[in-house]
Amino acid sequence: MKINIKATGIELTDAISDYVNKKISALDKYLENHPEAVVQVEVGKSTKHHRSGNVFLAEVHVTGQGLDLYALSEKSDLYAAIDLVKDEIVQNILSVKTKKETLTRRGARAIKEMMRGFNFFRRRK
């Protein structure tokens, strides 16, 4: 898994970079079937003029073999935004994994039912 970090509107310090790497590298156990996955992380300040104060933004975009997942978080604290976006992308990864497993099981069940029907008609003749 490759991690690319980009900062928008703020300076990318070593502390921020290390924190992002620590949090996002935890995704490695969820992406073990996708070793060539690329995770693009963008952190920075949001430029929405109608919100007062510091509003920090964290985005994660995971691409790779059959993957295209995206998560976004905005908070008043940069580290809280990073934590929240990490949790959100984990939920997205687990959702995709569950959908694929469900589709596989449904397909296997359909084949099994089809084979049962085929054997049923074959025995009666």
Image: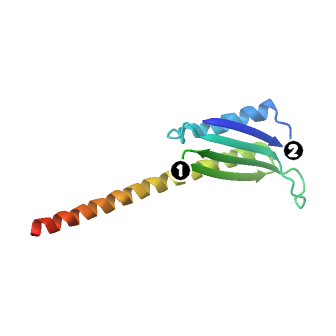
**What is the quadrant of residue 18 in the picture?**
top right
**What is the quadrant of residue 78 in the picture?**
top right
Q: Which of the two residues, 35 or 18, is positioned nearer the viewer here?
A: 35
Of helix, strand and loop, which one carries label 2? loop
* Count of marks, rendered view: 2
Q: x%, y% of residue 20?
A: 71, 37
- Name the residue carrying label 2: 9
- Name the residue carrying label 1: 94
Q: Residue at x 71, y 37 (%)?
A: 4
Q: Give the residue at the far top of this rendering.
A: 14
Q: Residue at x 68, y 48 (%)?
A: 85
Q: Residue at x 72, y 44 (%)?
A: 82
Q: Give the colour scheme shown.
A: rainbow
Q: Is residue 82 left or right of residue 33?
A: right
Q: x%, y% of residue 5?
A: 74, 38
Q: Is residue 12 left or right of residue 21?
A: right
Determine if residue 30 is in view: yes
**How many neighbours does mark 1 have within 10 angstroms: few (below 14), some (14-19), or many (20 or more)?**
few
Q: x%, y% of residue 72?
A: 71, 52
| Image disc number at residue 22 | none
Of helix, strand and loop, which one carries label 1? helix
Q: Residue at x 87, y 59 (%)?
A: 51
Please state, as top left, top right, bottom left or bottom right, where the C terminus lies in the image. Answer: bottom left
Q: x%, y% of residue 80?
A: 74, 46
The type of residue carrying mark 2 is: Gly
Q: Is residue 54 left or right of residue 67?
A: right
> Relative to residue 10, is residue 109 depicted above or below?
below
As measured in the structure, the alpha-carbon distance from the residue carrying label 1 to the one carrying label 2 is 31 Å
Please state, as top left, top right, bottom left or bottom right, where the N terminus lies in the image. Answer: top right
Mark 1 and 2 residues: CB-CB less than 8 Å, in contact?
no
The type of residue carrying mark 1 is: Leu
| Of marks 1 and 2, the one in the foreground | 2
